[in-house]
Amino acid sequence: MSDDYLFELHRRRFLMGTVATITAGILSSGRIADAYAADFPSKNIKVYIPTRQGGGADLNLQLVTGVWKKLLKINFEPVFQPGAAGRVAYEQYMGKASSDGHELLFGNMGPEVLNWVVKKPTFPLDAYRYFFRVDSDPSIIYISRRSKFKTIEDIVAAGKKETLNFATSRIAHPATIGVLALGKATGAKFNPIPFSGGRNTRNAVATGEVPFGALPSASIVIQQKNFKALALFDDKNVLGGKIDNAPLVNAKFGTKLPPLVSARAFAVKAETIQKYPDRMKILEDTLRKVVATEEYKQAVIKAKAPWELISPGGQKECAEYVKNILAIGEEYGDLLRGASAKEAAKKKKKKG
């Protein structure tokens, strides 16, 4: 039986299993409910983050848990585990984390699901579930305010003359797909350089190490005085002046790219949902309360993060997002795998 067949089987189970676990949660009654739900959580909750401290996931987690800890009356213990484009944290979580609901994973569904398209995980795709989405953050192309480039047309024109390196937080990312697909459509040559996390990716552009970068929009909105957005990979621009009224790539170049959106979300092991439906209900219900509070909204605004991108969603919405991003990954997988192979060869050459 081939690896490709097994991967496809796991992928289908991942999508179908989410529906099954949602249904199981609905059908569960008080008679069979977790007898210890009233005591949950009974200790601090550990959260695995697949990226470096200081990135978009870190900020989102801080904003949510700042309010959430008051509702649950516990503290959160973040564990940052960058490495292998997020793979390290997922493997650590799946291998070591408890399934009693006191250990969660918080990451960016977009790049972390795309990672499995580039290289299959060591665990079945249906072994974990995203259960609460916090935001929907479209990908953008951005430059330093000091850049010689002024428009997205400048970038494309330069890329037709010579290959332009660009900064990205990781190869398997919706933003990376966007730039590579734009290059393929226009004849421009772009080469992604992964800098492991949003902060490093911004710094690479700020210092001039690379001429431009591609990231989710929120991380650039927060640093708008230093960076200018040039183009947006979405079907609408809800941020307007907050991203310099950046044009839509499809409208500007006549491309037909799908919206390339990141979405930060909480995840648990699938067995947590199956074994502890009442604990899951507590987590989900309190998260919904968090994002509905004025305290949370003001914390987001104070952090200069765009409130317009906050887009809460439950298991159903997360499953739909995963289904869509897997389809995008399969459509543009060759671009990602090609870029990943180049990066691996470059690293091997450096070691040699």
Image (cartoon, helix red, strand yellow):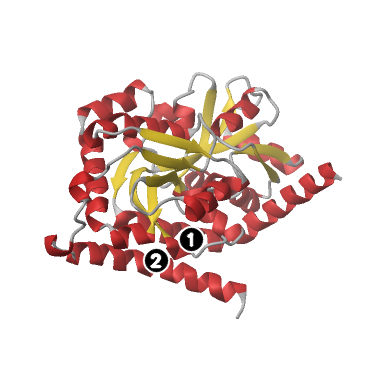
Residue 299, image x and y in percent?
A: 31, 25
Residue 26, image x and y in percent?
A: 19, 63
Is 164 in front, or is 316?
316
Res 53 label: none
Q: Can residue 179 be seen in this view?
A: no
Residue at the right extreme of this rendering: 352
Q: In this view, does 336 lie to the left or right of 280?
A: right
Residue 40, image x and y in percent?
A: 24, 45
Is 252 in front, or is 288?
288
Q: How many marks?
A: 2
Q: Earlier in the sequence, mark 2 or mark 1?
A: 2
Q: Name the residue under label 1.
A: 326
| Whether label 2 touches label 1, CB < 8 Å | yes
Residue at position x 72%, y 43% from top? Answer: 160
Residue at position x 36%, y 67% from top? Answer: 17
**Mark 1 Cα within 10 Å, few/some/many (few <14, many 20+)?**
many
Callout 2: SS: helix
Q: At label 1, which amino acid type do we have?
A: Leu
* Relative vertical location of residue 121 with respect to residue 43 in this rendering, above or below: below
Callout 1: SS: helix
Q: At label 2, which amino acid type do we have?
A: Leu
Q: Can residue 51 be seen in this view?
A: yes
Residue 304, image x and y in percent?
A: 38, 23
* Relative vertical location of residue 212 with respect to residue 2 in this rendering, above or below: above
* Relative vertical location of residue 67 with respect to residue 235 in this rendering, above or below: above
Q: Is residue 108 left or right of residue 199?
A: left
Q: Distance between the residues labelled 2 and 1?
A: 10 Å
* Relative vertical location of residue 112 with respect to residue 10 in this rendering, above or below: above
Q: Name the residue under label 2.
A: 15
